């Protein structure tokens, strides 16, 4: 099939692109403002393919200053968007460990003791220190709290109502079509295949869509962005080594909650010092809350789900959450490399926008606005080229899109943030000081060293729990968990002193119940597995097997052979397995032993 423009993924970046583009493809009288090359006399044919089963089935926070969103919708009012609220009170909290189970450095333990000793003179309440001052770079004053799912459905409806673009959910793009260093379109994934991709009942090969311009807005773990990185290489010195998995709940707060719509809480310090948390209050007693577990948390037993429950049970938060009810749940990877990971932004026949192109600002914790802004910059560039009848060559896209991007606030603020989190490579304290330094000096000062590949940071289970759990006990727990075909982290955390989770069937539910009740996870038949263990022999001799521990949906289990098993029907497509593997890929040590390909299914909730 032929089109003029084809887009990969419908996240905020592509929504920003299509919002700007779709409004200017026709004149007020309905005639084409610019003409299609494939359908003469018509406006350009613009198609967008989204892998999730519907628009807005992704995951995000979200609190945003909404600068780019307001530029696209000057009349935007939170009242017109479900679950939106203007930002109100903002707090940053340092959470002390009420159980003594987290792994804290000596310096942090000392700081905790000092805070506890001086708690009558400090704003300490329910084992939490309320920082007296929120740095300006973290503040979202005048911004909005949104449900990204609801906002994307709203934005998708606006885009499609113009009648000039088509968005197709449930349609993963399998690969970019590349001819002589030029991207000439995309190929959709095959349907009617078995789990290994071999033709089966109702086999339909993935359709080819040829287009003069392919727009890649497939997010931080998108397979098409990574295909282009592998094909064309990253610019010198760039790398994508910093990641975090963000896991969130959307909850009904108890009827008597004192939390007002617009409240923004950010936390650090607990359940582990490396884990950051957030709680944002929507209208009608609904809250979005969750944690980020980063790739620089050097634990082989990283689990976002269990840590999220311990975080909710922290006394400061639990007094607000007790009696609440789970509405929705999900997880997604956040690309934390920012400008460290910026790929080639444009080439012959293609352009990259959004988080996969290095837009997320890791200093301000902002990604939606930046992604949207780069989409609008590309749309303006595309309209300029279409009107001038110039082709989408690398040079023309550099002179229009990349030039706009370089001159924008996204670039200026991205540069300030570039090295702001390098301090976390050596520890939480240096990380926090480095962030403060970069934030307060506009990026002139920072701390730390360049990030290393995530697989290099993963210690053995025995080393990590040394002094807490003996090697013999670990061996016994391993055998027990293998027999039950479950991950090891639960048993390790129990042994290390973490209290049991008091399941209440409402808010504190098992991981499996979260999949069914909260994520409503589904996977249509007839598609290949999108998670593949590349070198089984490496899995067979792998000690840490962190892919099983970190899996957000319990979709990766020990399995019956030495190679883990993957269950597509539990996968939430968070992409965490892409970077949670302790073995380097022999063909590319920047990558690991798991392939995370484009696939269908996943979460069926548009609240996250
Ligand atoms: C838990 C969490 C909390 C966050 N909180 C905040 C916050 O408070 N404020 C903020 O500003 N930002 C926040 N972010 C970051 C923000 O969500 C991202 O920066 C933003 O969503 C990036 O937009 P994007 O369009 O570039 O990518 P994405 O939102 O990742 O969208 C990419 C889309 O492409 C689709 N796709 C991928 N591959 C394919 C394919 N092969 N074929 C078809 N479709 C494909 C995906 O399904 C997805 O819909 C948070 C992120 C997480 C995970
Ligand atoms: S995928 Fe990676 S972490 Fe998982 S078993 Fe294989 S080598 Fe180990
Ligand atoms: S298998 Fe699916 S749910 Fe598990 S980590 Fe990978 S993408 Fe996430």
Image: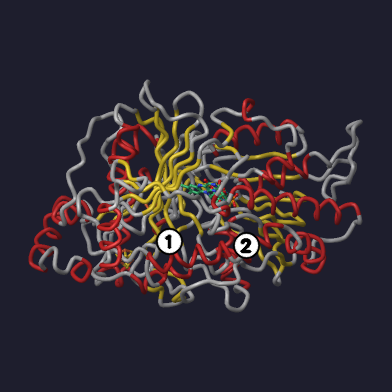
Residue 458 vertical position relative to residue 133 in the rendered view, above or below: below
Tell me what residue is drawn at x 40 percent, y 38 percent: 249
The percent coordinates of residue 145 (x first, y second) are 55, 37
The percent coordinates of residue 307 (x first, y second) are 30, 49
Crowd around label 1: few <14 · some 14–19 · many ≥20 (10 Å): many
Determine whether the residue tagged by mark 2 lies in a helix, strand or loop: helix
Say left or right for 109 vs 198. Answer: left
The percent coordinates of residue 135 (x first, y second) are 53, 54
Residue 384 vertical position relative to residue 502 in the rendered view, above or below: below
The verdict on label 1 being within 8 Å of ligand 3 is yes
The percent coordinates of residue 506 (x first, y second) are 29, 29
Which residue position is annotated with label 1? 578
Tell me what residue is drawn at x 47 percent, y 76 percent: 449
> Decide: marks 1, 2 in contact (CB < 8 A)?
no
**View quadrant of ligand 2:** bottom left
Which residue position is annotated with label 2? 414
Determine whether the residue tagged by mark 1 lies in a helix, strand or loop: helix
Residue 231 vertical position relative to residue 176 in the rendered view, above or below: below
Nearer-the-camera pick, 473 or 537: 473
Nearer-the-camera pick, 143 or 180: 143
Residue 114 vertical position relative to residue 75 in the rendered view, above or below: below
């Amino acid at each position: 099939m032929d089109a003029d423009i084809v887009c990969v993924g419908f996240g905020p970046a592509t929504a920003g692109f299509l919002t700007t583009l779709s409004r200017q493809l026709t004149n007020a009288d309905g005639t084409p403002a610019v003409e299609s090359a494939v359908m003469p006399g018509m406006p350009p044919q613009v198609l967008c393919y989204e892998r999730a089963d519907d628009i807005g089935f992704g995951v995000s926070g979200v609190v945003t200053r909404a600068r780019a969103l307001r530029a696209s919708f000057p009349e935007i009012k939170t009242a017109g968007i479900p679950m939106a609220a203007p930002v109100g009170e903002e707090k940053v909290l340092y959470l002390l460990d009420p159980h003594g189970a987290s792994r804290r450095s000596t310096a942090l333990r000392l700081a905790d003791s000092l805070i506890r000793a001086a708690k009558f003179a400090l704003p300490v309440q329910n084992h939490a220190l309320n920082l007296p001052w929120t740095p300006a770079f973290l503040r979202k004053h005048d911004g909005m709290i949104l449900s990204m799912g609801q906002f994307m459905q709203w934005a998708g409806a606006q885009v499609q109502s113009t009648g000039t673009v088509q968005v197709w959910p449930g349609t993963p793009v399998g690969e970019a079509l590349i001819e002589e260093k030029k991207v000439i379109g995309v190929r959709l994934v095959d349907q009617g295949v078995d789990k290994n991709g071999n033709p089966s009942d109702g086999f339909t090969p993935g359709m080819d869509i040829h287009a003069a311009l392919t727009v890649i807005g497939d997010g931080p773990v998108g397979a098409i962005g990574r295909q282009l990185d592998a094909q064309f290489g990253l610019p010198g010195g760039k790398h994508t080594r910093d990641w975090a998995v963000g896991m969130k709940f959307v909850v009904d707060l108890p009827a008597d909650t004192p939390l007002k719509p617009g409240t923004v809480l950010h936390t650090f310090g607990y359940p582990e010092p490396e884990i950051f948390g957030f709680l944002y209050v929507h209208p009608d007693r609904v809250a979005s809350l969750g944690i980020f577990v980063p790739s620089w948390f050097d634990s082989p037993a990283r689990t976002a789900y269990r840590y999220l429950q311990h975080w909710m049970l922290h006394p400061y938060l639990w007094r607000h959450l007790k009696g609440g009810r789970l509405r929705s749940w999900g997880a997604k990877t956040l690309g934390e490399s920012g400008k460290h990971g910026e790929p080639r932004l444009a080439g012959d026949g293609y352009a990259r926008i959004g988080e996969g192109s290095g837009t997320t600002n890791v200093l301000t914790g902002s990604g939606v606005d930046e992604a949207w802004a780069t989409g609008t910059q590309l749309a303006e560039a595309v309209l300029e080229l279409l009107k001038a009848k110039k082709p989408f060559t690398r040079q023309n896209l550099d002179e229009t899109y990349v030039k706009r991007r370089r001159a924008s606030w996204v670039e200026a603020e991205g540069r300030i943030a570039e090295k702001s989190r390098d301090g976390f490579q050596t520890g939480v304290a240096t990380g926090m000081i480095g962030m403060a330094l970069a934030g307060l000096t506009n990026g002139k000062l920072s701390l730390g060293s360049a990030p290393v590949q995530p697989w290099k940071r993963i210690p053995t289970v025995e080393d990590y729990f040394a002094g807490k759990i003996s090697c013999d006990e670990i061996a016994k727990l391993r055998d027990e968990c293998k027999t039950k075909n479950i991950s090891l982290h639960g048993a390790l955390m129990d042994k290390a002193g973490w209290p049991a989770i008091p399941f209440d069937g409402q808010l504190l539910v098992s991981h499996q119940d979260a999949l069914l009740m909260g994520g409503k996870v589904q996977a249509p038949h007839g598609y290949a597995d999108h998670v593949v263990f590349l070198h089984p022999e490496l899995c067979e001799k792998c000690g840490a097997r962190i892919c099983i521990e970190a899996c957000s949906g319990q979709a990766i289990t020990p399995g019956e052979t030495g190679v883990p098993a993957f269950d597509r029907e539990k996968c939430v497509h968070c992409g965490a397995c892409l970077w949670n593997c302790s073995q380097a890929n022999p063909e590319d040590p920047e990558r690991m032993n798991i392939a995370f390909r484009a696939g269908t299914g996943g979460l069926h909730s548009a609240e996250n």
